[in-house]
Image (cartoon, grey):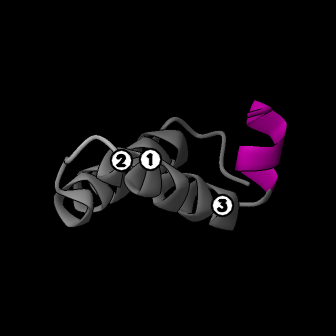
């Protein structure tokens, strides 16, 4: 996914996380747990982004 799209539209990250979770279900991975972890990663990335002074 183009990083510009992710930066301008944070909701895209949520959609992407749901797509990954749906894919994980096909491989018998706990989709809820994976979605939770991906959400934590996305939140941490945004915190780093804001702290870096490159705020939107």
Spatial CA distance of label 1 from label 3 is: 21 Å
Q: Quadrant of residue 32?
A: bottom left
Q: Which residues are magenta?
A: 1-8
Look at mark 2 in the image and give the residue it sits on. Answer: 26
Spatial CA distance of label 2 from label 1 is: 5 Å
Give the number of the disc on residue 10.
Answer: 3
Q: Could you tell me which secondary element the residue under label 1 belongs to? A: helix
Quadrant assignment for the C terminus: bottom right
Judged left or right of residue 19, residue 11 is: right
Residue at image position (25%, 52%) is 34
Residue at image position (26%, 59%) is 31
Of badges 2 and 1, the one in the foreground is 2
Of badges 1 and 3, the one in the foreground is 1
- What x and y, as percent, mark residue 20? 46, 47
Q: Is residue 5 magenta?
A: yes
- What x and y, as percent, mark residue 40? 28, 54
Tell me the chief SS of the magenta region.
Answer: helix
- What x and y, as percent, mark residue 41? 33, 45
22 or 46: which is nearer to us? 22
Give the number of the disc on residue 23.
Answer: 1
Judged left or right of residue 33, residue 41 is: right
- Determine contact: label 2, label 1, CB under 8 Å: yes
Q: Could you tell me which secondary element the residue under label 2 belongs to? A: loop
- What x and y, as percent, mark residue 3? 74, 33
16 or 55: which is nearer to us? 16
């Amino acid at each position: 996914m183009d990083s510009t799209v992710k930066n301008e539209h944070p909701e895209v990250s949520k959609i992407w996380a749901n797509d990954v979770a749906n894919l994980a279900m096909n491989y018998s991975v706990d989709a809820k747990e994976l979605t939770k972890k991906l959400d934590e990663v996305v939140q941490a990335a945004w915190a780093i982004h804001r702290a870096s002074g490159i705020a939107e």
